[in-house]
Amino acid sequence: MVVAELVGSGELVNPQEITTASDAGLLPQRIKGMTLSGGLAMGHAVLHQPRLTLREMVAEDPEVELDRLRDAVTSMHSAIDDLVVVSRASGSGEYIDILESYRMFAQDRGWLGRIREAIQQGLSAEGAVERVQNEMRARLGQIADPYFRERQHDFDDLTNRLLNHLAGKNSGIELGLPEDAILVARSLGPAELLDYGGGRLRGLILEEGSATSHVAIVARGLDIPLITRCNRALSLIEPLDPLIIDGANGQVFIRPSEDIVDSYNRSSQLSAERRRLYSEVRDLPAVTEDGEPLSILINASLLIEVPHLESTGAEGIGLYRTEIPFMVRAEYPDVVQQTESYRSILDLAGGRPVTFRTLDVGGDKTLPYFPEHEEENPAMGWRAIRIGLDRPAMLRMQLRAMIRATAGCELRVMFPLIAEVAELDAARNILNIELDRARAEQRTLPTEIKVGVMLEVPSLLFQLDQLLKSVDFVSLGTNDLLQYFYAADRNNPRIGQRYDVLSPGFLDALMTVFERCRAARVPICVCGEMASRPLEAMALIALGARILSVTPQSVGSIKALVRSMNAGRVRTFLSPLVKSRDHSLRDKLHDFARDHHTAIDDVAVAV
């Protein structure tokens, strides 16, 4: 009772000490998120709040409102068509597929029909648009499928755009953006991002979004740093607040203090110095200090990423993920469309090798036109080659398109998620059927056909002898292999970071794979995220990797690493450690690299 009286009277704790200061919103803050497009950026906040305040929800004359809607829809379609034309003229690759899909949403008869029905029930055009959007948001919000939840953002964009046209306003962004704008939004559609243009936009912060969202694909293509899942970003950030985006660590600094700004400036300077270093080694061979040559390739998912071959000096594409163009379309692409896509990739590659991975969908990668299947554990469920073998028409169409696209040149095709050699044999039989079909049609065949598998299921490690007799190459998918190796879902925040790719057991398994492939004279390429990080790449090279396929942004840092390391010396250090009982060898490898002046550092803002 005495303590209660002291607290109540304010004699124990001064009430001012537990009262939120009125200027707390002006203090520096940091929020964590998920990086979808890496990089550093500093600028001033622009809040994306496009919704208009609706003043008239009902109308007396439905015919007048229907005429207003018709004019607004025509104006909106024209503006979207102009956006498609501009993007096509600029050679924006998959932007065309994304915008074409977006345009199909805008022309959706069901969506527009429901708006007209609401007008005929007495609502104004604006009120009808708002009601239909609320109903659609409620329906899509109950769907667990991530693709359809992401399409809600496209319809949000269309609703805002249509409301602006009804109000007689241009949906494009007015002049007046700061020179260093960082856009902050709850969610964003691809056309909305393109409305802002790339001239003044330095970064993008979203409260919602995923790696498969259309806006994420466009942001990566424009090389705009993007961090999503930033909770309460719109409530914490005021217009024109200074912001720093740290893509390396997935964090945003709001109203950063002087020491954070100084750290950003140092990091930016270091990043610029490294870019100069990378440009200097661009045309130099990727050879270690002790004379071990390596091949550095890139991973690509979009046509707009292929020109990075020229700008980075990479030797080819070690992994082309064919599923992304499927995911941004509103309907399944036919053989002609797929053939054109693959041929465009080969043309841009300019004779460099391109390895096409067949469709790897299912799990967290869904197609909008594919039947939905509820699975308790989708990462280990019906996906990738399992779908291809169960739905052979899909796999046959894709292989038919690849054969036609590579007429007169080399075809390199890789099958994902092979768990047993029998699955590889079944996939090869389908490929042979399509080759026989092409011969019967008297089509020009590829000059050479090389077939490989993505090694990402541990069961295949116990069939290596049979596997290596049946393939021309192996690609090591470290992302899935690690989660299956440790039975740990990498998307689960509780355990996603529990196990390390630099753990002794995992490295020991990789060393065995490299040794067996080398003995069988079968090339093996590492194309998972592990190859794109300098410290991890150093370990891979020491274990025997000689072909790395990395993100385009990582080519310079990996080549600098290769030219600064002694592979034999690192192998001598690492080999006995893979038999240790340690949880991870990361710290030991990091210290070794620092002691031997090996280029392993990543650029990030220090906290």
Image: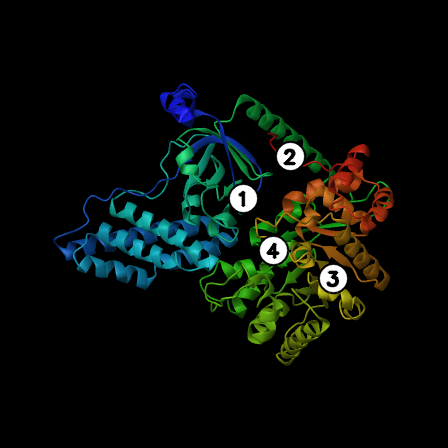
For the residues labelled 2 and 4, the Cα–Cα distance comes to 28 Å
1 or 2: tag closer to the N-terminus: 1
2 or 4: tag closer to the N-terminus: 4
Q: Is residue 22 visible?
A: no
Q: Which of the colour schemes (rainbow, by chain, secondary structure, one colour) is used?
A: rainbow
- What residue is rendered at 35% in x and 55% in y? 137
Residue 422 percent location from the top left of the image: 70, 74
Mark 4 closeness class: few <14, some 14–19, many ≥20 residues within 10 Å = some
Residue 347 percent location from the top left of the image: 62, 57
Q: Residue tagged by mark 4?
A: 489
Residue at the limit of the structure toward the front, as seen here: 1
Pick whichever, 192 or 384, lies toward us: 384
For the residues labelled 3 and 4, the Cα–Cα distance comes to 24 Å
Q: Residue tagged by mark 3?
A: 474
The residue type indicated by label 2 comes to Val
Q: Is residue 92 above or below residue 517?
A: above
Residue 468 percent location from the top left of the image: 79, 67
Q: Residue tagged by mark 1?
A: 34
